[in-house]
Amino acid sequence: MSRLAFPTFCLATGLLLSITLSQAEKPVSMIAFGSCLKESRPQPIWKGVIAAKPDLFVLLGDNIYGDTRDMAKLKAKWHVFEEKPGFRKLRENCRILGIWDDHDYGENDAGIEYPKKIESQKIFLDFLGEPKDSIRRKTPGTYDAVTIGPKGKRVQFILLDTRYFRTALKRAPKREKGKGPYGPDESDKAEVLGEAQWRWLEKTLHEPAEVRIIASSIQVVSATHGWETWGNFPKERGRFLKLLKKTKANGVIILSGDRHSAEISKLDETLPYPLFDVTSSAMNQTQKPGKEENPHRVSDRYFRENFGVLKINWSKPQTRVTMEIRNLVGKIVRTAQVTF
């Protein structure tokens, strides 16, 4: 499930739009992203997103709060979201890519045990306007990859599914102060991606690209806070980092959501370059400020409404990516840079 960015669908009409080869090969230099949108609440943040003029927007999960096993209700909530004026205006002007997290998957903190995952996948792909004959509709899970841009300026978007195959979370024997309720599952059978998705990911990482954006609904780098994170599955997290190194995957930046706060995390000495995990959350689901363990955090957390931006400077001899967290009105509140 890896493809070039030639056809796309208009989410407003469901009609296939024609994109020429030259348009598909146009370099991407401005990417926006975000997560955690309560569909029943106002969404004024889209005004700031639109003002940033992104080439592409990545929905990072909890795009709605479905939380149901009634598929009619789930579908209705997706419809409420796609009719939001701000979101409608955005998708008229830029491409939308998306992954899901637990609430739009269907149930809080759910994984492989959620009984309606097959039906929920169809509804999610309908929302994204996925073609009826797409391989993404014919295989379990919603993972996908899209490469955009000409040789020398290619951006590969790797969209992971951290729900469909994920082992049920393990409760911590004793909840520590300042941490969430979950602990690490050391079992060899504990999974995040599932073997089919792992095989696909390894193959995908071997494909040529200058910058690789890996969208994971849950954090990868921040691993010890006790809420949902790849750190709940330490062997899977280790496998992920080893795979990046094994495939010599260049230009990787991770995007994540879920946490109802924003932060930028940096992992050194794992790859030949620093690995950043940019967490943007929430677009309209804020929480009260609080302390949380993350030894890899750059600066501090941001707790108000926010969205993320990646700005790619393709100037030779090096490619520079500026990572930003922007507030409700589009003002930069956190930032970092990496050069590949």
Image (tube, rainbow, N blue to C red):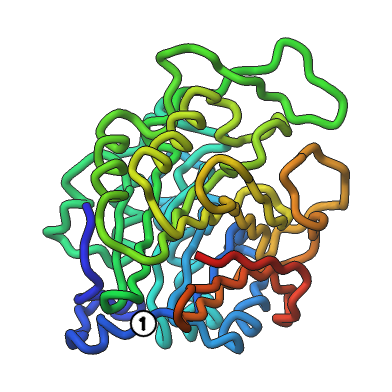
Residue 230 against residue 58 in the figure, above or below: above
In the picture, measured across the screen, residue 100 lies left or right of residue 256, that is left
Q: Position of residue 12 (x, y in %)?
A: 35, 79
Tell which residue pokes out farthest to the front in this image: 317
**Left or right for 250, reference 24:** right
Residue 95 shows in the view: yes
Looking at the image, residue 173 lies above or below residue 294: above
Label 1 element class: loop
Q: Reply above or below: 64 against 11.
A: above
Q: Residue at x 49, y 48 (%)?
A: 216
Mark 1 packing: few (<14 Cα in 10 Å), some, or many (20+)?
A: some
| Frontmost residue, 166 versus 153 | 153
Q: Is residue 76 visible?
A: no
- Between 50 and 209, which is closer to the camera in this rendering? 209
- Where does residue 130 sit, x and y in percent of width and height? 25, 63
Task: Identify the residue position indicated by label 1 in the image.
Answer: 27
Residue 221, position in %: x, y?
A: 61, 42
Q: Residue at x 26, y 75 (%)?
A: 151
> Relative to 280, is 121 above or below?
above
Identify which residue is drawn at 47% across, 72% down.
57
Q: Residue at x 87, y 25 (%)?
A: 177
Camera-side residue of 270 and 221: 270
- Tag 1: residue type? Pro
- Image coordinates of residue 275 in percent, x first then y, are 56, 51
Going by the image, does 132 lie left or right of 191? Answer: left
